[in-house]
Image: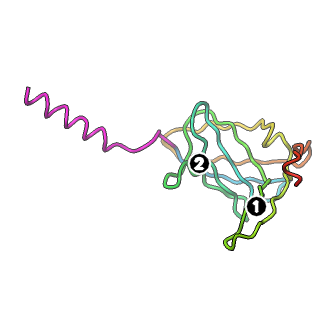
Amino acid sequence: MKHLSCGLILSVILFGCGSSGPEIASVEGTVTLDGQPLANASVVFVPEGGRPAGASTDAQGKYVLNFSEDRQGAIPGKNVVRISTARGETTDDNGQMVPGSPETIPAKYNAQTTLEFNVEPGKVNTADFTLESEGELPAVSDTERD
């Protein structure tokens, strides 16, 4: 009985020492619009039945996905991808309101996305997206216009 209790305690301790959260894989890439880098766009990967991962593109259109504050990557498997340039109204460090900005790229890349990417486990995934500005922009809601 003593050996069983020690074994059970050891199992619980070892199980508790594992990595927190689901398995993720690194994802990085570049987003271009009409052949030019798309700066300051949000890139979100949404897996089937899991937590999304996101990033913002830099001046060269490059991004690295973040799953959480301290983990980079996305859940492996098929992910729906949304890319957006819209920004909601926020406040700056002084508490002053900073106006938002409307969407500047077609809905087929965000609200009505057709983009998908299969994240492969155990490797650095490169997901580059070449977007074209031709297409319908998302409708602006009344709350976005105010």
Residue at 89% across, 43% down: 139
Query: Residue 20 lies in what quarter of the image?
Result: top left
Residue at 70% across, 36% down: 116
Front residue of 144 and 41: 144
Extreme residue toward the top, this view: 1
**Which residue has dot 2 on it?**
27
Query: Residue 125 lies in what quarter of the image?
Result: top right
Front residue of 27 and 3: 3
Q: Amino acid at mark 2?
A: Val
Q: Is residue 7 magenta?
A: yes
Percent x, y for residue 107? 84, 42
Percent x, y for residue 86? 80, 53
- Tell me, for residue 47, which label it has, or none: none
- Tag 2's secondary structure? strand
Closer mark to the observer between disc 2 and disc 1: 1
Bounds of the magenta span? 1-24
- Above or below, comparing residue 92 to residue 54 in the picture: below
- Which secondary structure class fits the magenta region best? helix
> Which circle's residue, 2 or 1, is located before the other in the chain?
2
Q: Cα distance, mark 2 to mark 1?
A: 18 Å
**Which residue has dot 1 on it?**
39
